[in-house]
Image (cartoon, rainbow, N blue to C red):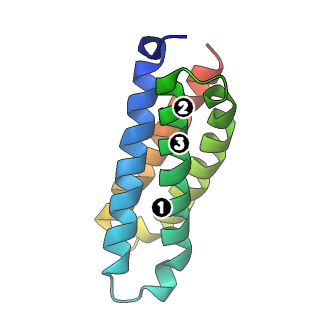
Amino acid sequence: MSHENHRQIITSLYDCATECNHCATVCLDEQDVKMLSRCIKLDLDCAAICSLTATLLARGSEHGHHLLKECIEVCNACAEECEKHASMGMEHCRTCAEACRACAEACNNHINQ
């Protein structure tokens, strides 16, 4: 299947990976990094699975579609964790949570097409 058929989901996956990588980097510069360790780990996991899935879909790999369910799970976990820190005024976590929620929804929609 052509990557053109996956263009929107690929964009959502890469956008999410970008926000997660940014969030992890900014979290490392925060005062209490230990408090953010789970957030950083989830950011990195989410960025990795979203990037891999986008790459496989872009190549037309038969395996890319299978990873969408894992993306939904990891995106939702990352969003949930980031939302905790966003409520404490961490704007980068708020932005990351929004990107993760949007990506999870896009993945779910793509699966159900």
Q: Residues within 10 Å of mark 2 (few under 14, many from 20)?
A: some
Q: Is residue 89 visible?
A: no
Tell me which residue sits at (47%, 63%) in the image.
82
Percent position of residue 57, x then y? 52, 26
Amino acid type of the residue tagged 2 in the rendering: Leu
Q: Are marks 1 and 2 in contact (CB under 8 Å)?
A: no
Picture coordinates of residue 95 (x, y %)?
34, 54
Query: Gap in Å between the C-alphas at discs 3 and 2?
Result: 6 Å
Q: Is residue 58 visible?
A: yes
Please give the label number shown on residue 63. Answer: none
The quarter of the rendered structure image containing the N terminus is top right
Q: Which residue sits at x=37%, y=78%? A: 28
| Residues at discs 3 and 2 in contact (Cβ within 8 Å) | yes
Total label count?
A: 3
Question: In the figure, is residue 92 to the left or right of 109?
Answer: left
Q: Amino acid at mark 3?
A: Leu
Residue 13 drawn at (x, y percent) = 45, 37
Horizontal placement of 52 versus 29: left or right?
Answer: right
Say whether disc 1 or disc 3 marks the residue closer to the N-terminus.
3
| Circle number at residue 56 | 2
Pick the quarter of the image with the C terminus. top right
Amino acid beneath label 1: Glu
The label number, if any, that marks residue 83 in the structure image: 1
Q: Which residue is mark 3?
A: 52
Question: Which residue occupies 34% across, 69% down?
Answer: 25
- Vertical placement of residue 27 versus 70, above or below: below
